[in-house]
Amino acid sequence: MFHASNNIVARIFSRQISSPRSGTSVHRSRQFYENLVPSYTIYDVDCPDYSFRKFTDDGQYLISFSRNNQELIVYRPTWLSYSCKGDDCESHGLPPEAKRFESYFTQLYCINLASGNESISKDFFLYMESNHFGVFATSTSQILDAPVTEGAIHGVPVIEKITLHLVRMEDGVIMDERTFRNDFVNLAHNSGVFLYDDLLSIMSIRYQMIYILQIRASGHLVDVRAIGQFCQEDDELFLNSHTQGFVPLDKGKQEESSICQDNSSMQLDQPTQGGAFLSGIKQRLLSFIFRGIWNEETDHSLRVQRLKKRFYFHFQDYVDLVMWKVQFLDHHHLLIRFCSVDGGMSRNTDQYRAFFAVYNMETTEILAFYQNSAEELFHLFEQYCDHFRAPSRSPLYMNFISSHSNNIHALEQLRKQKDACLKNKATNFSQLVKKTLAFLPFHCQSQSPSPYFDQSLFRFDEKLISSTERHRPSTEHPIKFISKRHPYSLKFKIKPGPEAGGVDGRSKRLSCFLFHPVLPFAISIQQTLQPSVINIHSVMNIHFRK
Protein backbone atom coordinates (compact mmCIF):
# COMPACT_ATOMS: atom_id res chain seq x y z
CA MET A 1 0.00 0.00 0.00
CA PHE A 2 1.29 3.44 -0.91
CA HIS A 3 2.25 5.80 1.88
CA ALA A 4 4.18 9.02 2.14
CA SER A 5 7.81 8.63 1.13
CA ASN A 6 8.98 11.00 3.86
CA ASN A 7 7.98 10.15 7.39
CA ILE A 8 5.28 12.77 7.97
CA VAL A 9 4.08 11.25 11.28
CA ALA A 10 7.58 11.32 12.75
CA ARG A 11 8.00 14.95 11.67
CA ILE A 12 4.68 15.91 13.28
CA PHE A 13 5.65 14.30 16.58
CA SER A 14 9.20 15.68 16.51
CA ARG A 15 7.73 19.20 16.73
CA GLN A 16 5.94 18.34 19.96
CA ILE A 17 7.53 18.83 23.37
CA SER A 18 7.83 15.53 25.18
CA SER A 19 7.68 15.30 28.96
CA PRO A 20 11.00 14.40 30.64
CA ARG A 21 10.10 10.90 31.78
CA SER A 22 13.57 10.10 33.01
CA GLY A 23 13.93 13.34 35.00
CA THR A 24 14.82 13.56 38.65
CA SER A 25 11.30 14.56 39.72
CA VAL A 26 9.77 11.49 38.09
CA HIS A 27 12.44 9.23 39.60
CA ARG A 28 11.77 10.59 43.09
CA SER A 29 8.03 10.18 42.60
CA ARG A 30 8.53 6.55 41.63
CA GLN A 31 10.55 5.92 44.80
CA PHE A 32 7.78 7.54 46.83
CA TYR A 33 4.99 5.41 45.35
CA GLU A 34 7.01 2.21 45.57
CA ASN A 35 7.06 2.56 49.36
CA LEU A 36 3.59 4.06 49.90
CA VAL A 37 1.02 1.56 48.66
CA PRO A 38 -2.74 1.01 49.24
CA SER A 39 -2.16 -2.02 51.44
CA TYR A 40 -5.27 -1.72 53.65
CA THR A 41 -8.64 -3.01 52.42
CA ILE A 42 -12.06 -2.05 53.77
CA TYR A 43 -14.51 -4.64 52.50
CA ASP A 44 -18.12 -4.08 51.47
CA VAL A 45 -18.28 -0.35 52.08
CA ASP A 46 -21.74 1.09 52.65
CA CYS A 47 -22.15 3.11 49.43
CA PRO A 48 -25.04 4.90 47.75
CA ASP A 49 -26.62 2.93 44.93
CA TYR A 50 -24.81 4.72 42.14
CA SER A 51 -22.71 3.66 39.17
CA PHE A 52 -19.19 4.93 39.77
CA ARG A 53 -17.38 5.90 36.57
CA LYS A 54 -13.88 7.23 37.28
CA PHE A 55 -11.68 9.80 38.96
CA THR A 56 -10.80 12.82 36.89
CA ASP A 57 -7.17 12.76 35.76
CA ASP A 58 -6.19 15.42 38.29
CA GLY A 59 -7.90 13.45 41.09
CA GLN A 60 -10.15 16.29 42.21
CA TYR A 61 -13.48 14.66 41.35
CA LEU A 62 -15.12 11.24 41.39
CA ILE A 63 -17.74 10.86 38.66
CA SER A 64 -20.83 8.73 39.24
CA PHE A 65 -24.29 8.27 37.74
CA SER A 66 -27.64 7.28 39.17
CA ARG A 67 -28.88 3.76 38.49
CA ASN A 68 -31.55 5.01 36.10
CA ASN A 69 -28.82 6.82 34.14
CA GLN A 70 -30.55 10.16 34.44
CA GLU A 71 -28.50 12.03 37.04
CA LEU A 72 -24.85 13.02 37.39
CA ILE A 73 -23.42 12.90 40.91
CA VAL A 74 -19.97 14.35 41.56
CA TYR A 75 -17.88 13.81 44.71
CA ARG A 76 -14.74 15.38 46.09
CA PRO A 77 -12.25 12.83 47.51
CA THR A 78 -11.29 13.36 51.15
CA TRP A 79 -9.07 11.34 53.46
CA LEU A 80 -10.13 9.16 56.38
CA SER A 81 -8.09 9.59 59.54
CA TYR A 82 -8.74 8.60 63.14
CA SER A 83 -7.02 8.75 66.50
CA CYS A 84 -5.82 5.83 68.55
CA LYS A 85 -4.89 5.97 72.24
CA GLY A 86 -2.22 3.60 73.42
CA ASP A 87 0.77 1.77 72.03
CA ASP A 88 -0.76 -1.24 70.24
CA CYS A 89 -2.92 0.67 67.76
CA GLU A 90 -2.63 -1.84 64.94
CA SER A 91 -4.52 -4.43 66.97
CA HIS A 92 -7.50 -2.11 67.36
CA GLY A 93 -10.36 -2.49 64.96
CA LEU A 94 -11.25 0.25 62.51
CA PRO A 95 -13.86 2.78 63.63
CA PRO A 96 -17.38 2.45 62.20
CA GLU A 97 -16.68 5.43 59.93
CA ALA A 98 -14.27 3.31 57.89
CA LYS A 99 -17.22 1.41 56.42
CA ARG A 100 -19.03 4.53 55.30
CA PHE A 101 -18.58 5.95 51.84
CA GLU A 102 -19.08 9.48 53.17
CA SER A 103 -15.87 9.15 55.18
CA TYR A 104 -13.88 9.16 51.97
CA PHE A 105 -15.95 11.42 49.70
CA THR A 106 -18.00 14.58 49.96
CA GLN A 107 -20.87 15.00 47.53
CA LEU A 108 -20.63 18.31 45.68
CA TYR A 109 -23.86 18.19 43.67
CA CYS A 110 -26.39 16.04 41.86
CA ILE A 111 -27.80 17.34 38.57
CA ASN A 112 -30.18 15.92 35.99
CA LEU A 113 -28.57 15.44 32.58
CA ALA A 114 -31.08 13.14 30.82
CA SER A 115 -34.84 13.29 30.56
CA GLY A 116 -37.62 11.28 28.93
CA ASN A 117 -36.31 8.35 26.91
CA GLU A 118 -32.71 9.61 27.06
CA SER A 119 -30.05 8.12 29.31
CA ILE A 120 -26.51 9.04 30.26
CA SER A 121 -23.82 7.17 28.34
CA LYS A 122 -22.00 5.59 31.29
CA ASP A 123 -18.90 4.70 29.27
CA PHE A 124 -18.37 8.25 28.05
CA PHE A 125 -16.61 11.07 29.88
CA LEU A 126 -13.87 13.53 28.92
CA TYR A 127 -12.18 15.96 31.26
CA MET A 128 -10.62 19.29 30.33
CA GLU A 129 -8.24 19.89 33.21
CA SER A 130 -7.16 23.43 32.29
CA ASN A 131 -10.65 24.85 32.83
CA HIS A 132 -12.14 22.03 34.94
CA PHE A 133 -14.83 21.24 32.37
CA GLY A 134 -16.35 17.80 31.91
CA VAL A 135 -17.90 16.55 28.67
CA PHE A 136 -20.80 14.13 29.19
CA ALA A 137 -23.17 12.50 26.72
CA THR A 138 -26.82 11.49 26.78
CA SER A 139 -28.62 9.58 24.05
CA THR A 140 -31.67 7.58 23.14
CA SER A 141 -31.39 3.88 22.36
CA GLN A 142 -29.94 2.59 19.10
CA ILE A 143 -32.13 1.61 16.16
CA LEU A 144 -30.38 -1.17 14.27
CA ASP A 145 -32.72 -1.55 11.28
CA ALA A 146 -33.43 2.10 10.53
CA PRO A 147 -34.41 2.96 6.95
CA VAL A 148 -31.69 4.44 4.75
CA THR A 149 -31.98 8.17 4.22
CA GLU A 150 -30.20 10.43 1.75
CA GLY A 151 -26.56 10.89 2.64
CA ALA A 152 -26.55 8.16 5.29
CA ILE A 153 -24.33 5.07 5.28
CA HIS A 154 -26.21 1.80 4.93
CA GLY A 155 -25.74 -0.71 7.77
CA VAL A 156 -24.89 1.84 10.45
CA PRO A 157 -27.21 2.06 13.51
CA VAL A 158 -29.22 5.19 14.19
CA ILE A 159 -29.59 7.11 17.43
CA GLU A 160 -32.52 9.49 17.39
CA LYS A 161 -30.87 12.04 19.68
CA ILE A 162 -27.31 12.44 20.96
CA THR A 163 -26.43 15.38 23.21
CA LEU A 164 -22.99 16.41 24.45
CA HIS A 165 -23.08 18.42 27.67
CA LEU A 166 -20.27 20.72 28.78
CA VAL A 167 -20.40 20.85 32.59
CA ARG A 168 -18.38 23.07 34.90
CA MET A 169 -17.08 20.54 37.40
CA GLU A 170 -16.73 23.03 40.24
CA ASP A 171 -20.47 23.57 40.70
CA GLY A 172 -22.28 21.40 38.12
CA VAL A 173 -23.46 24.24 35.89
CA ILE A 174 -24.21 23.08 32.33
CA MET A 175 -22.31 25.64 30.26
CA ASP A 176 -23.25 24.50 26.74
CA GLU A 177 -24.74 21.62 24.78
CA ARG A 178 -24.50 20.21 21.26
CA THR A 179 -27.18 17.88 19.83
CA PHE A 180 -27.03 15.43 16.90
CA ARG A 181 -30.24 13.94 15.58
CA ASN A 182 -30.77 10.67 13.70
CA ASP A 183 -27.03 10.12 13.67
CA PHE A 184 -24.54 7.62 15.05
CA VAL A 185 -21.57 8.69 17.19
CA ASN A 186 -19.84 5.78 18.92
CA LEU A 187 -19.82 6.88 22.57
CA ALA A 188 -18.52 3.61 24.05
CA HIS A 189 -15.22 4.24 25.84
CA ASN A 190 -14.96 7.71 24.22
CA SER A 191 -14.47 6.04 20.85
CA GLY A 192 -16.17 8.65 18.69
CA VAL A 193 -15.05 11.83 20.49
CA PHE A 194 -11.47 13.01 21.05
CA LEU A 195 -10.27 15.89 23.22
CA TYR A 196 -6.94 17.58 22.47
CA ASP A 197 -6.25 20.65 24.63
CA ASP A 198 -9.29 22.84 23.88
CA LEU A 199 -10.25 21.10 20.60
CA LEU A 200 -12.95 18.46 20.39
CA SER A 201 -13.43 16.14 17.40
CA ILE A 202 -16.73 14.30 16.93
CA MET A 203 -16.99 11.45 14.41
CA SER A 204 -20.43 11.20 12.81
CA ILE A 205 -20.27 7.72 11.30
CA ARG A 206 -23.74 7.70 9.79
CA TYR A 207 -23.22 10.90 7.77
CA GLN A 208 -19.41 10.66 7.46
CA MET A 209 -18.64 14.01 9.03
CA ILE A 210 -15.88 15.05 11.42
CA TYR A 211 -16.97 18.03 13.51
CA ILE A 212 -14.21 20.11 15.11
CA LEU A 213 -15.31 22.23 18.06
CA GLN A 214 -13.38 24.51 20.37
CA ILE A 215 -14.09 24.67 24.09
CA ARG A 216 -13.70 28.30 25.08
CA ALA A 217 -12.65 29.36 28.58
CA SER A 218 -16.07 30.99 28.86
CA GLY A 219 -17.67 27.56 28.62
CA HIS A 220 -19.01 27.78 25.07
CA LEU A 221 -18.71 25.18 22.31
CA VAL A 222 -17.69 26.98 19.13
CA ASP A 223 -17.77 25.44 15.65
CA VAL A 224 -14.32 25.42 14.04
CA ARG A 225 -14.89 23.30 10.93
CA ALA A 226 -16.73 20.29 9.53
CA ILE A 227 -14.78 17.76 7.44
CA GLY A 228 -16.45 15.24 5.19
CA GLN A 229 -18.78 16.30 2.43
CA PHE A 230 -16.73 19.50 2.13
CA CYS A 231 -13.24 20.33 3.36
CA GLN A 232 -13.00 24.11 2.99
CA GLU A 233 -15.57 26.60 4.23
CA ASP A 234 -16.35 27.82 0.70
CA ASP A 235 -16.35 24.39 -0.98
CA GLU A 236 -20.13 24.21 -1.14
CA LEU A 237 -20.39 27.67 -2.69
CA PHE A 238 -17.65 26.83 -5.18
CA LEU A 239 -19.29 23.54 -6.10
CA ASN A 240 -22.73 25.07 -6.60
CA SER A 241 -21.37 27.87 -8.77
CA HIS A 242 -19.58 25.41 -11.05
CA THR A 243 -22.35 22.84 -11.40
CA GLN A 244 -25.05 25.17 -12.68
CA GLY A 245 -23.95 24.59 -16.26
CA PHE A 246 -22.56 21.10 -15.69
CA VAL A 247 -23.12 18.65 -18.54
CA PRO A 248 -22.53 14.99 -17.54
CA LEU A 249 -19.83 13.23 -19.51
CA ASP A 250 -19.82 9.61 -20.44
CA LYS A 251 -18.55 7.35 -17.69
CA GLY A 252 -15.06 6.69 -19.09
CA LYS A 253 -14.26 10.35 -19.78
CA GLN A 254 -15.74 11.39 -16.47
CA GLU A 255 -13.49 9.06 -14.48
CA GLU A 256 -10.47 10.36 -16.37
CA SER A 257 -11.31 14.02 -15.85
CA SER A 258 -12.23 13.67 -12.18
CA ILE A 259 -9.17 11.69 -11.16
CA CYS A 260 -6.69 13.97 -12.90
CA GLN A 261 -7.86 17.16 -11.18
CA ASP A 262 -5.55 19.06 -8.85
CA ASN A 263 -5.69 17.69 -5.29
CA SER A 264 -5.33 21.13 -3.71
CA SER A 265 -8.73 22.37 -4.92
CA MET A 266 -12.26 21.10 -4.64
CA GLN A 267 -13.23 19.18 -7.76
CA LEU A 268 -16.13 17.15 -9.09
CA ASP A 269 -15.93 13.42 -9.00
CA GLN A 270 -17.85 10.92 -11.07
CA PRO A 271 -21.38 10.36 -9.81
CA THR A 272 -22.11 7.20 -7.96
CA GLN A 273 -25.41 5.39 -8.30
CA GLY A 274 -28.20 7.89 -7.80
CA GLY A 275 -26.14 10.80 -9.18
CA ALA A 276 -24.44 11.77 -5.88
CA PHE A 277 -20.86 13.03 -5.86
CA LEU A 278 -18.20 11.57 -3.65
CA SER A 279 -17.36 13.63 -0.59
CA GLY A 280 -14.51 16.10 -0.45
CA ILE A 281 -12.48 13.97 1.97
CA LYS A 282 -12.88 10.93 -0.29
CA GLN A 283 -11.75 13.07 -3.25
CA ARG A 284 -8.61 14.01 -1.35
CA LEU A 285 -7.95 10.38 -0.50
CA LEU A 286 -8.38 9.06 -4.05
CA SER A 287 -6.21 11.83 -5.44
CA PHE A 288 -3.45 11.10 -2.92
CA ILE A 289 -3.44 7.38 -3.73
CA PHE A 290 -3.47 8.05 -7.48
CA ARG A 291 -0.62 10.55 -7.36
CA GLY A 292 1.45 8.36 -5.08
CA ILE A 293 1.28 5.44 -7.50
CA TRP A 294 1.79 7.78 -10.47
CA ASN A 295 5.02 9.21 -9.03
CA GLU A 296 6.52 5.79 -8.32
CA GLU A 297 7.25 5.22 -12.02
CA THR A 298 8.64 7.46 -14.73
CA ASP A 299 8.11 5.03 -17.60
CA HIS A 300 4.64 5.60 -19.07
CA SER A 301 3.81 1.95 -19.82
CA LEU A 302 4.92 0.77 -16.36
CA ARG A 303 3.00 3.64 -14.79
CA VAL A 304 -0.21 2.60 -16.57
CA GLN A 305 0.24 -1.02 -15.50
CA ARG A 306 0.74 -0.02 -11.88
CA LEU A 307 -2.31 2.22 -11.94
CA LYS A 308 -4.46 -0.56 -13.37
CA LYS A 309 -3.23 -3.08 -10.82
CA ARG A 310 -3.08 -0.93 -7.67
CA PHE A 311 -5.60 1.84 -8.24
CA TYR A 312 -8.30 1.09 -10.80
CA PHE A 313 -8.64 -2.55 -9.77
CA HIS A 314 -9.29 -1.47 -6.15
CA PHE A 315 -11.09 1.76 -7.03
CA GLN A 316 -14.51 0.65 -5.78
CA ASP A 317 -12.95 -0.70 -2.58
CA TYR A 318 -11.53 2.76 -1.88
CA VAL A 319 -14.86 4.40 -2.70
CA ASP A 320 -16.68 2.09 -0.27
CA LEU A 321 -14.38 2.94 2.66
CA VAL A 322 -16.01 4.84 5.52
CA MET A 323 -14.44 6.99 8.20
CA TRP A 324 -14.91 5.15 11.47
CA LYS A 325 -12.63 6.77 14.02
CA VAL A 326 -10.49 9.88 14.34
CA GLN A 327 -7.99 11.44 16.71
CA PHE A 328 -5.78 14.51 16.85
CA LEU A 329 -2.05 14.16 16.26
CA ASP A 330 -1.57 17.85 16.98
CA HIS A 331 -3.60 21.03 16.53
CA HIS A 332 -3.53 20.76 12.73
CA HIS A 333 -3.35 17.04 11.89
CA LEU A 334 -5.85 14.21 12.25
CA LEU A 335 -5.36 10.47 12.12
CA ILE A 336 -8.44 8.95 10.45
CA ARG A 337 -9.29 5.26 10.34
CA PHE A 338 -11.02 4.08 7.17
CA CYS A 339 -12.64 0.66 6.96
CA SER A 340 -15.71 -1.17 5.70
CA VAL A 341 -18.99 -1.00 7.63
CA ASP A 342 -18.63 -4.68 8.56
CA GLY A 343 -15.09 -4.07 9.81
CA GLY A 344 -16.21 -1.15 11.93
CA MET A 345 -19.14 -3.00 13.47
CA SER A 346 -17.12 -6.16 14.21
CA ARG A 347 -15.59 -6.86 17.60
CA ASN A 348 -12.49 -8.31 15.92
CA THR A 349 -11.42 -5.27 13.95
CA ASP A 350 -7.94 -6.68 13.27
CA GLN A 351 -9.53 -9.41 11.12
CA TYR A 352 -10.65 -6.84 8.55
CA ARG A 353 -8.64 -4.68 6.21
CA ALA A 354 -8.45 -1.07 7.33
CA PHE A 355 -6.49 2.04 6.42
CA PHE A 356 -5.11 5.06 8.25
CA ALA A 357 -4.84 8.52 6.74
CA VAL A 358 -3.00 11.55 8.11
CA TYR A 359 -5.01 14.66 7.23
CA ASN A 360 -3.99 18.31 7.50
CA MET A 361 -7.04 20.35 8.48
CA GLU A 362 -5.50 23.65 7.39
CA THR A 363 -4.42 22.66 3.88
CA THR A 364 -7.12 19.92 3.49
CA GLU A 365 -4.44 17.54 2.21
CA ILE A 366 -3.97 13.84 2.85
CA LEU A 367 -0.31 13.57 3.86
CA ALA A 368 0.08 9.82 4.41
CA PHE A 369 -1.93 6.66 3.86
CA TYR A 370 -1.21 3.28 5.47
CA GLN A 371 -2.87 -0.12 5.48
CA ASN A 372 -3.34 -1.77 8.87
CA SER A 373 -0.58 -4.25 7.98
CA ALA A 374 2.01 -1.51 7.29
CA GLU A 375 5.20 -2.19 9.23
CA GLU A 376 6.27 1.44 8.94
CA LEU A 377 3.21 2.62 10.89
CA PHE A 378 3.79 -0.17 13.41
CA HIS A 379 7.33 1.06 14.04
CA LEU A 380 6.06 4.64 14.36
CA PHE A 381 3.51 3.47 16.89
CA GLU A 382 6.23 1.58 18.72
CA GLN A 383 8.49 4.65 18.86
CA TYR A 384 5.89 7.40 19.39
CA CYS A 385 3.15 5.63 21.31
CA ASP A 386 2.91 8.40 23.92
CA HIS A 387 2.42 11.05 21.26
CA PHE A 388 -0.53 9.15 19.82
CA ARG A 389 -2.16 9.01 23.24
CA ALA A 390 -1.22 12.07 25.28
CA PRO A 391 -2.31 15.70 24.91
CA SER A 392 0.30 18.28 23.99
CA ARG A 393 0.66 19.56 27.56
CA SER A 394 0.76 16.65 29.98
CA PRO A 395 1.07 17.16 33.75
CA LEU A 396 3.74 15.25 35.62
CA TYR A 397 1.46 12.50 36.91
CA MET A 398 0.61 11.42 33.33
CA ASN A 399 4.20 10.16 33.06
CA PHE A 400 3.26 7.02 34.98
CA ILE A 401 1.23 5.60 32.08
CA SER A 402 3.49 2.86 30.72
CA SER A 403 3.96 2.21 27.03
CA HIS A 404 6.59 0.57 24.88
CA SER A 405 7.94 4.01 23.93
CA ASN A 406 8.67 5.11 27.52
CA ASN A 407 9.05 1.90 29.50
CA ILE A 408 11.72 -0.74 28.95
CA HIS A 409 9.55 -3.46 30.50
CA ALA A 410 6.62 -2.75 28.18
CA LEU A 411 9.02 -2.62 25.22
CA GLU A 412 10.53 -5.95 26.20
CA GLN A 413 7.06 -7.47 26.34
CA LEU A 414 6.32 -6.23 22.82
CA ARG A 415 9.62 -7.60 21.54
CA LYS A 416 8.83 -11.00 23.02
CA GLN A 417 5.52 -10.97 21.14
CA LYS A 418 7.36 -10.07 17.93
CA ASP A 419 9.92 -12.86 18.44
CA ALA A 420 7.14 -15.38 19.18
CA CYS A 421 5.34 -14.41 15.96
CA LEU A 422 8.50 -14.79 13.92
CA LYS A 423 9.26 -18.20 15.42
CA ASN A 424 5.73 -19.56 15.21
CA LYS A 425 4.98 -20.85 11.72
CA ALA A 426 1.23 -20.75 12.37
CA THR A 427 1.31 -16.98 12.75
CA ASN A 428 3.18 -14.19 11.03
CA PHE A 429 4.40 -10.73 11.85
CA SER A 430 1.62 -9.02 9.89
CA GLN A 431 -0.95 -10.47 12.30
CA LEU A 432 0.84 -8.85 15.22
CA VAL A 433 0.99 -5.58 13.27
CA LYS A 434 -2.76 -5.66 12.61
CA LYS A 435 -3.52 -6.55 16.21
CA THR A 436 -1.35 -3.70 17.51
CA LEU A 437 -2.62 -1.09 15.05
CA ALA A 438 -6.21 -2.00 15.93
CA PHE A 439 -5.72 0.33 18.93
CA LEU A 440 -5.43 3.29 16.56
CA PRO A 441 -6.83 5.87 16.72
CA PHE A 442 -6.58 5.80 20.50
CA HIS A 443 -9.60 6.01 22.77
CA CYS A 444 -9.20 9.38 24.43
CA GLN A 445 -8.51 9.38 28.21
CA SER A 446 -9.05 5.63 28.45
CA GLN A 447 -6.11 4.84 30.75
CA SER A 448 -5.61 5.52 34.42
CA PRO A 449 -2.49 7.60 35.20
CA SER A 450 -2.13 5.94 38.60
CA PRO A 451 1.52 5.21 39.48
CA TYR A 452 0.52 1.73 40.68
CA PHE A 453 0.13 0.71 37.02
CA ASP A 454 3.65 1.90 36.21
CA GLN A 455 5.45 -1.17 34.89
CA SER A 456 8.76 0.23 36.12
CA LEU A 457 7.46 -0.14 39.67
CA PHE A 458 5.15 -3.15 39.80
CA ARG A 459 4.38 -6.39 38.07
CA PHE A 460 0.78 -7.66 38.02
CA ASP A 461 -1.53 -9.90 36.00
CA GLU A 462 -2.82 -7.70 33.17
CA LYS A 463 -5.59 -10.18 32.43
CA LEU A 464 -7.13 -9.28 35.79
CA ILE A 465 -6.19 -5.61 36.16
CA SER A 466 -4.55 -2.90 34.05
CA SER A 467 -4.52 0.83 33.47
CA THR A 468 -7.07 0.49 30.66
CA GLU A 469 -10.53 1.24 31.98
CA ARG A 470 -12.43 -1.96 31.25
CA HIS A 471 -14.37 -4.56 33.23
CA ARG A 472 -12.28 -7.65 33.98
CA PRO A 473 -13.19 -11.19 35.03
CA SER A 474 -13.17 -11.37 38.79
CA THR A 475 -11.18 -13.93 40.78
CA GLU A 476 -11.42 -15.43 44.25
CA HIS A 477 -7.75 -14.75 44.87
CA PRO A 478 -6.23 -11.32 45.52
CA ILE A 479 -4.42 -9.59 42.67
CA LYS A 480 -0.78 -9.28 43.64
CA PHE A 481 1.46 -6.30 42.91
CA ILE A 482 5.09 -7.43 42.93
CA SER A 483 8.02 -5.03 43.15
CA LYS A 484 10.07 -4.75 39.96
CA ARG A 485 13.27 -3.83 41.82
CA HIS A 486 12.81 -6.76 44.22
CA PRO A 487 11.13 -9.43 42.03
CA TYR A 488 9.99 -11.65 44.91
CA SER A 489 8.77 -8.86 47.17
CA LEU A 490 4.98 -8.55 47.45
CA LYS A 491 4.18 -4.85 47.88
CA PHE A 492 0.36 -5.05 48.19
CA LYS A 493 -2.74 -6.95 47.12
CA ILE A 494 -6.10 -5.89 45.69
CA LYS A 495 -9.04 -8.19 46.35
CA PRO A 496 -12.43 -7.36 44.81
CA GLY A 497 -15.63 -8.83 46.21
CA PRO A 498 -16.53 -10.03 49.72
CA GLU A 499 -13.76 -10.71 52.18
CA ALA A 500 -14.82 -14.35 52.55
CA GLY A 501 -15.17 -14.87 48.81
CA GLY A 502 -18.22 -15.39 46.59
CA VAL A 503 -21.09 -17.63 47.62
CA ASP A 504 -22.09 -18.89 44.18
CA GLY A 505 -19.05 -19.77 42.12
CA ARG A 506 -21.15 -20.45 39.03
CA SER A 507 -22.34 -16.88 38.55
CA LYS A 508 -20.29 -14.69 36.25
CA ARG A 509 -18.47 -11.97 38.13
CA LEU A 510 -16.85 -8.88 36.68
CA SER A 511 -14.71 -6.33 38.41
CA CYS A 512 -13.60 -2.81 37.66
CA PHE A 513 -11.02 -0.73 39.48
CA LEU A 514 -10.93 3.03 40.01
CA PHE A 515 -7.46 4.17 41.04
CA HIS A 516 -6.87 7.70 42.23
CA PRO A 517 -4.24 9.28 39.93
CA VAL A 518 -2.17 10.72 42.78
CA LEU A 519 -3.15 9.25 46.18
CA PRO A 520 -2.57 5.64 47.31
CA PHE A 521 -6.27 4.99 47.04
CA ALA A 522 -8.41 2.66 44.91
CA ILE A 523 -11.99 1.45 44.65
CA SER A 524 -12.79 -2.08 43.48
CA ILE A 525 -16.32 -2.86 42.30
CA GLN A 526 -17.41 -6.46 41.80
CA GLN A 527 -20.59 -6.91 39.80
CA THR A 528 -22.74 -10.05 39.83
CA LEU A 529 -26.44 -10.80 39.73
CA GLN A 530 -26.44 -9.70 43.37
CA PRO A 531 -25.86 -6.07 44.45
CA SER A 532 -22.37 -4.82 43.69
CA VAL A 533 -19.68 -5.22 46.33
CA ILE A 534 -17.50 -2.13 46.73
CA ASN A 535 -14.18 -2.26 48.54
CA ILE A 536 -11.82 0.58 49.32
CA HIS A 537 -8.07 0.04 49.25
CA SER A 538 -6.02 2.72 50.94
CA VAL A 539 -3.44 3.70 53.50
CA MET A 540 -4.98 4.39 56.88
CA ASN A 541 -3.99 7.72 58.40
CA ILE A 542 -3.72 6.98 62.14
CA HIS A 543 -2.93 9.61 64.78
CA PHE A 544 -1.43 8.22 67.97
CA ARG A 545 -2.30 9.62 71.40
CA LYS A 546 -0.62 8.76 74.67
Image (cartoon, rainbow, N blue to C red):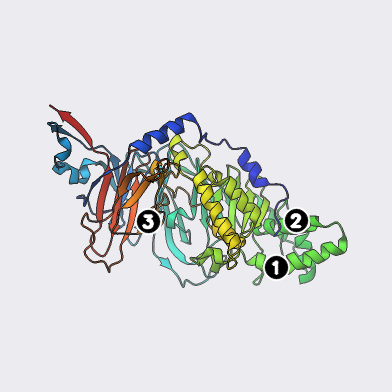
Picture coordinates of residue 400 (x, y %)? 44, 40
Residue of label 1: 314
Q: Residue at x 83, y 57 (%)?
A: 297
Residue behind mark 3: 464
Which quadrant would the N terminus be assigned to in this image? bottom right
Q: Which label lies toward us, 1 or 3? A: 3
Residue in the foreground of this view, choosing between 73 and 439: 439
Instruction: Please identify the quadrant where the C terminus is shown.
Output: top left
Q: Amino acid at mark 3?
A: Leu
Q: Earlier in the sequence, mark 1 or mark 3?
A: 1
Q: Residue at x 68, y 47 (%)?
A: 7
Circle nearer the N terminus (3, 2): 2
Q: Earlier in the sequence, mark 2 or mark 1?
A: 2
**Residue drawn at x 56%, y 59% as measured from the top left:** 420
Q: Which mark is residue 292?
A: 2
Amino acid type, mark 2: Gly
Q: Amino acid at mark 1?
A: His
In the drawing, does residue 533 fall left or right of residue 383? left
Give the vertical position of 240 relative to 59 (above or below): below
